[in-house]
Amino acid sequence: MAVKVRIPTPLMKLTNNQAEVEAEGVTIEEMFNNLESQFGGIKERICEENGSPRRFINIYVNEEDIRFLDGEKTAIKDGDEVSIIPAIAGGTH
Amino acid sequence: MSFVKGLRCKECGKGYEKLPVHVCEYCFGPLEVDYDYEAIQKVVSRKSIQDGPPSMWRYRPFMPIDGDPKVGLNTGYTPLIRAKNLGKALGLKELYIKNDSVNHPTFSFKDRVVAVAVTKAIEMGFDTLSCASTGNLANSVAAHAAEAGLKSCIFIPDGLESGKILGTLIYGSKLIAVNGSYDDVNRLCSEVAATHNWAFVNINIRPYYGDGSKSYGYEIAEQLGWKTPDNVVVPVAGSSLITKIWRAFNEFKDLGLIDKVTSKIFAAQATGCSPVTTAIKNGSEMITPVKPNTIAKSIAIGNPADGYYGIKTTKISGGWGEDINDEEVVEGMRLLAETEGVFTETAGGVTVGVTKKLIEQGRIKPDESTVICITGNGLKTLEALEGQFEMPTVIQPNLKEFEEHYSSHVAV
């Protein structure tokens, strides 16, 4: 159950400068835990204490925002692509 | 001369150098420009501003650039119109429209932010400009790239109005339409920004860029005679402008240029894309993102970056948020055109229509001074008016046909 995870620049220090890593899990939540076991300290940077993504981080599975899916319970499967992206971008109006 | 000390995280306060970065690497909060207000205070007065150029650069010390502006020297200082006819139609004694539909050079308020962003990009040595845009920003980045002699690669959602597309291509820009909504485009751009060393005006240049829109707020205060109005109705997409108008008013107050700020700030959205006004009405601080479905494409952002701060601005100021359907958007555009002779795009229809609704709700009162923000030009969103009017009858070029036609069509 390996998924590809794209890491935002500010977190690449924790992933040995890798912009893309592999992680395991059948849900986003499990994938976060797996990331943490590989790259200690990364989970608290992405998630609040209750496990949901921080206010200024958006998580996408195959280009879809997980808030339109099942949030951190969203199911993932082998070959899926997960992006972790800072929420602050775009817009002006 | 620079009045910028650096950048600072709006959430955790961590300081950063003046670099092309937009997100705090610790908490992912937005970075803001950290100004040296003491130094600004020494050089700024009502007189120094009034003696400045008739453009947004009369507020140069408040702008986050280090040297002189490099592009957009004629941007801003657009008319604040005393809208007596519209006021009468809506039942308001003192109504104004701040009309950025005639902003230079691309007819929207985005020229303000882009003038700053492109100047900053030049200062930082970039050779390519980029952005995610719903159209107006695309037009403006393309135009200013041409002026600066820089390359540009611009991303838009597919299905935009032709004025927004052709009005970008004309400047020689590389334009990429993405199958999806603005939010898809924005996400893609964030990923492209990680691998391309370009100046993405609303990503890595965002802290500087956003402050260009403070000039819209300064102008409202100055043009009203150095005071702020009781109400401001602002179109909301990503929710940045609304926070910058509020910031501008408060900076003027803090530096003693105006006495006080008592304005209520109101957020206006189209119902088909109203994550911010919905949160305000629900009393929530959390934005639930939506998939946009409205003719007001220029403000169709379903996942607003600054939504949280937009909500806070309405709350702190005592304002509110309201949204209207697409039919009401067109009614708003027509009402402004018919009463004031100003043809705004759909986003302007939104602010006019929402103002009407807020008056009906008693949130805006007849004797209060109110400013409606008009941020874009109607000639760019003609598609929104398709089917709204009967096209003119063609007559032969003779007097008889004219008289027949005129008498049968015009009630005397």
Image (spheres, helix red, strand yellow):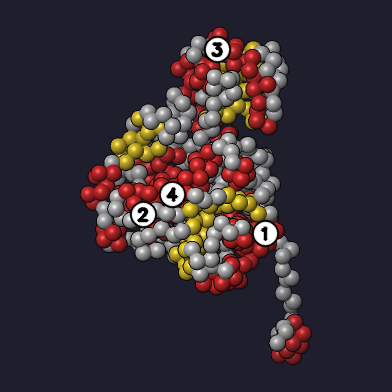
Q: Position of residue B306 (x, y in %)?
A: 51, 40
Choose mark 3 or mark 4, whichever is in front. 4
Question: Horizontal and vertical percent for residue A18?
Answer: 51, 17
Sequence-wise, the earlier of marks 2 and 4 is 4
Give the chain letter at badge 2. Answer: B
In this rendering, which labeled residue sits more in front, label 1 or label 2? 2
- Disc 2 and disc 3: Cα gap in Å? 50 Å
Q: Nearer the viewer, residue B335 or B119?
A: B335
Total labels: the figure holds: 4
Q: Chain of mark 4?
A: B
Q: Which residue was labeled with disc 3?
A: A36
Badge 3 crowding class, 10 Å Cα cut-off, few under 14, some 14 to 19, many 20 or more, is: some
Q: Say left or right for B412 vs B203.
A: right
Q: Which residue is mark 1?
A: B328
Label 2 crowding class (10 Å Cα cut-off): few <14, some 14-19, many 20+?
Answer: some
Q: Earlier in the sequence, mark 1 or mark 2?
A: 2
* Residue kind at label 4, given as amino acid type: Trp
Asked if marks 2 and 3 fall on the same chain, the answer is no
Say which chain tag 3 marks. A
Tell me if residue B46 comes above or below residue A28 in the rendering: below
Distance from the alpha carbon under mark 1 to that under mark 4: 27 Å
